[in-house]
Image (cartoon, rainbow, N blue to C red):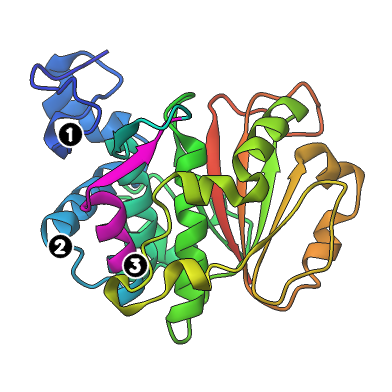
Amino acid sequence: MALHKNFPKDKFQILDPAIRWFPADEDLRKEGYEKLLPPFVPELREKVAEWRAGNYEGASETSRALLNWWFKELHTIYAKDGTSIAFQYYYAQREAVETIIWIYDVGKVANKYDLIKFDKLGRVSPNMFTEDWLRFVIKMATGSGKTKVMSLLLAWSYFHKLYEENSELSKNFLLITPNIIVLDRIKTDFEGLKIFYEDPILPDNGYQGQNWQDDFQIKLHLQDEVGTISKSGNIFLTNIHRVYEGDIKRRVLRMRTHRIIFWEARLSAKPMIQKLIWVKLCAMLMS
């Protein structure tokens, strides 16, 4: 496998698209790089890198404010013993969030036809996708911070819907985990909305003219403890087996607003569930 000689060891350093890892010997980089990567990846990396260097030009005011807060401001968090720790998101986490926001805000991708234009080698065609809803997939390795990416995108969708006129994003979310072990882990992160306050996800009130923390009014509903649905926003956390065993899809579709669904999936022993080779997080915009 090829790891460029200039590939940095610092997990926070911004990576130049020209020195990224790819699944072959380094000698094949010039001839086989794009052919050996998944469709869309080479083109989107270049677009996002250029956009980042241009200070997120073309993004909505809400998106730009959040990106600057998350990735350009200095942050401090506190350990259980009260000691302060400098906090920074990994570059892989940053790039994942930036890519989704670029695709929606700048790339104006509204359907599969809009997305296919980023496949420079023509390996993807519309008939490969039978869904009529927009789906963005982020492939991330185990331990790379999928939950943090998920929480950032959830907050982005929420505030975009709240602050941006005619936003088609959502303040209602369905989080689906692959098994009870992961469900319990995600529950620990999201219970009491802890992750949104322990990580620097919500900007300070007054930042860029918005009262972010006061306006983040969202209610968490656990798998068997669905309470009164809040008009200001909801997070529904459940396990993948309930999707197949129950009637969740029909009940979720009763909601009249747009929805964004985050799905964290691993290999499954259930034959009814598609077996996935890698851990992935899907953000699915449904109309």
Above or below — where is 144 with respect to 162?
A: above
> Which one is in front, 58 or 218?
218
Residue bounds of the magenta highlight: 65-79
> Which one is in front, 272 or 64?
64
Q: Residue at x 67, y 45 (%)?
A: 191
**Residue at image mark 3:** 63
Q: Residue at x 60, y 39 (%)?
A: 189
**154 relative position to 227: left or right:** left
On residue 55, the disc is 2
Q: Residue at x 90, y 55 (%)?
A: 247
Q: Is residue 150 magenta?
A: no
**20 relative position to 121: left or right:** left
Is residue 190 something one can see in this rendering?
yes
**46 relative position to 280: left or right:** left
On residue 13, the disc is 1
Q: Secondary structure at mark 3?
A: helix
Above or below — where is 200 with respect to 147?
A: below
Tell me the amino acid under the disc marked 1.
Answer: Gln
Q: CA distance from mark 3 to mark 1?
A: 22 Å
Neighbor class of circle 2 (other Cα within 10 Å; few <14, some 14-19, many 20+) is few
Instruction: Please report contact status of discs 3 and 1: CB closer than 8 Å, yes or no.
Output: no
Quadrant where the image shows the N terminus: top left
On residue 210, the disc is none
